[in-house]
Image (spheres, rainbow, N blue to C red):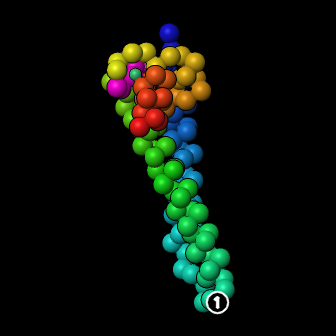
Amino acid sequence: MTDLKSVKSGLETRLAELEARAGRIEADLAEPLSADFEEQATEREDDDALEGQEVLLGREIVAVKAALARVEDGSYGECTRCGEDVGEKRLEAHPEAALCIACARELENH
Ligand SMILES: [Zn+2]
């Protein structure tokens, strides 16, 4: 039986970290480009990399929030696609996992 309390606090900690990181990235992106043309090119490249990170972070934040919602409504640990158990080992490695390994593999292949 999964210890939902520790799962929940783990997810909450993770969410706080992710949001802090997303906040820093946003602050970085909000900085105006420097007046120097050559610097601008580097800064644009940095910004592109940051935007990529921001997208990934955003997805993870959504996944963690959804996992927290599933803890709340009691469906945590069930695959959101087929309803089977996600599996304790998988949840240990990926507490935010919404899909069982079979569904995750199937979706990856599409
Ligand atoms: Zn499934």
State the predominant SS element of the stretch in magenta: loop
| Closer to us: 60 or 74 | 60
Relative vertical location of residue 102 with respect to residue 44 in this rendering, above or below: above
Seen at 58% across and 18% down, the residue is 89
Quadrant containing ligand 1: top left
Relative vertical location of residue 54 with respect to residue 91 in this rendering, above or below: below
What residue range appears in magenta?
77-81
Describe residue 22's horizontal placement relative to residue 72 as left or right: right
Q: Residue 63: x percent and y percent?
A: 44, 38
Seen at 57% across and 81% down, the residue is 33
Describe residue 76's horizontal placement relative to residue 44 as left or right: left
Residue lying furthest top in this view? 1
Based on the displayed image, in which of its 4 quarters is residue 94 positioned?
Answer: top right
Q: Residue 107: x percent and y percent?
A: 42, 33
Give the labeled residue for mark 1.
Answer: 36
Q: Residue 47: x percent and y percent?
A: 57, 69
Seen at 48% across and 54% down, the residue is 55
| Closer to us: 25 or 101 | 101
Residue lying furthest front in this view? 109
Q: Evaluate whether residue 72 shows in this view.
A: no
